[in-house]
Amino acid sequence: MARGLMPKPALLLADEPSLGLGPRLAHAALTHLPDLNQRWGTAILLVEQNAREALAVAHRVYVLRLGRIVLADKPEKLTPEVLRQAFLG
């Protein structure tokens, strides 16, 4: 991730940044993303399986199923039931 931030990009694509990390490191990696967004103005597209952690740092949420957007909203508007329905169909 540090290497991708060196040129100070306008957009950072973060594909599963917590993959292979222990719970503490995964949490640390994801909780630093909002700081990058606020301090540097870097927009971040986060693809993450850990929905709880991703929802905690997201401004917008898009749930994809078979390549199609099945849910798009602000994280604070999403209830567990709405998310369950979007993920499981």
Image: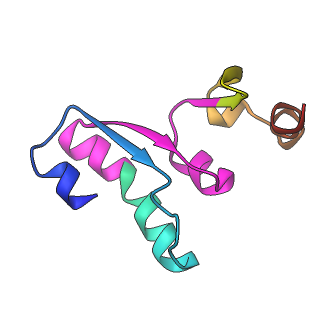
Q: Residue at x 52, y 40 (%)?
A: 58
Is residue 37 left or right of 59 when viewed as pictured?
left
Q: Residue at x 52, y 64 (%)?
A: 19
Q: Quadrant of the C terminus?
A: top right
Q: Position of residue 37 (x, y in %)?
A: 30, 42
Is residue 57 a member of the stretch shown in magenta?
A: yes
Can you tell which quarter of the image residue 53 is in?
A: bottom right
Q: Quadrant of the N terminus?
A: bottom left
Can you tell which quarter of the image residue 71 is in?
A: top right
Which segment is the magenta one? 34-62
Q: Position of residue 52 (x, y in %)?
A: 67, 54
Q: Residue at x 55, y 30 (%)?
A: 60
| Viewer-nearest residue: 51 or 41 | 51
Q: Residue at x 84, y 43 (%)?
A: 80
Is residue 11 a member of the stretch shown in magenta?
A: no
69 over 44 or under it: above or below: above
Q: Position of residue 66 (x, y in %)?
A: 73, 28
